[in-house]
Image (cartoon, helix red, strand yellow):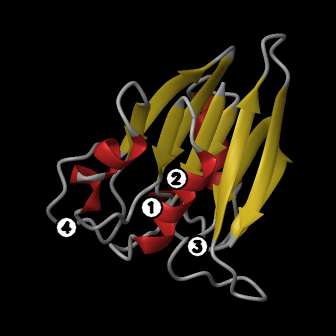
């Protein structure tokens, strides 16, 4: 199972559309917020049959997306949130604690515009960074590919434009 994880596209969709075309085929597209209206078009760009999991970010003022989701990715349970309600700008501990309290193995968040991947108290915590306004050193737009193999092993790969 191939999962494309993106966040903070802020309606500057040229990089997102390029990544979608470059990474096809994939089974799931996760958007962790701040699509700012583009959530209406993303399923079409991803293609028929692609599972969509999108949450609302702090700039998605008129969105009808959920604030948080819990989804199954192979044998793993993932907690999806933009992260601003969990203090992710100060660190990943709050989102990791919430994921753990919900029985999730993985916590995915956005908001900081910085790629992140680490284990926090037994929970894999990740942030794909931003495809539109990256804030990490080098300021390269980023996303993440998560691959769950048939035997249940998982790999995470941050990729940069």
- Would you say 123 lies left or right of 98 here? right
Taking the image as drawn, is residue 89 in sight?
yes
**Element type where label 4 sits in the image:** loop
Any mark on residue 112, and which? 3
Q: On the rendered image, what quadrant is the C terminus found in?
A: bottom right
Mark 1–mark 2 CB contact (< 8 Å):
yes
Q: On the rendered image, what quadrant is the N terminus found in?
A: top right
Of the numbered discs 4 and 1, the one sitting upstream in the chain is 1
Mark 3–mark 4 CB contact (< 8 Å):
no
Q: Which residue is mark 4?
A: 61
Closest to the observer, 6 or 117? 6
The Cα atoms of the two marked residues, 3 and 2, are separated by 25 Å
Residue furthest out toward the left: 62
Closest to the observer, 82 or 93? 82
Of the numbered discs 1 and 3, the one sitting upstream in the chain is 1
- Packing grade of label 2 (10 A; few <14, some 14-19, many >=20) is few
Kindly report which numbered mark, 3 or 2, lies closer to the viewer in this rendering. Answer: 2
The Cα atoms of the two marked residues, 4 and 2, are separated by 28 Å
Any mark on residue 5, and which? none
User: What residue lies at 77% left-to-right and 40% top-to-bottom?
Assistant: 124
Q: Which residue is mark 1?
A: 17
Of the numbered discs 4 and 2, the one sitting upstream in the chain is 2
Closest to the observer, 89 or 76? 76
> How many discs mark residues in the rendered view?
4
90 lies above or below 146: below
Q: Which residue is mark 2?
A: 21
Of the numbered discs 3 and 4, the one sitting upstream in the chain is 4
**Element type where label 2 sits in the image:** helix
The Cα atoms of the two marked residues, 3 and 4, are separated by 18 Å
């Amino acid at each position: 199972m191939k999962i494309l994880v993106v966040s903070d596209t802020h309606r500057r969709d040229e990089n997102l559309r390029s990544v979608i075309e470059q990474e096809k085929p994939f089974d799931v597209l996760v958007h962790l917020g701040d699509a700012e209206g583009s959530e209406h078009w993303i399923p079409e760009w991803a293609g028929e049959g692609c599972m969509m999991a999108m949450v609302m970010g702090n700039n998605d003022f008129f969105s009808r997306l959920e604030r948080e989701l819990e989804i199954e990715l192979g044998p793993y349970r993932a907690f999806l949130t933009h992260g601003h309600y969990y203090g992710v700008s100060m660190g990943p501990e709050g989102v990791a604690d919430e994921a753990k309290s919900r029985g999730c193995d993985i916590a995915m968040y956005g908001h900081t515009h910085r790629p992140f991947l680490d284990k926090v108290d037994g929970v894999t915590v990740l942030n794909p960074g931003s495809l539109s306004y990256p804030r990490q050193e080098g300021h390269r737009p980023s996303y993440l590919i998560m691959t769950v193999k048939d035997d249940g092993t998982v790999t995470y790969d941050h990729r940069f434009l």
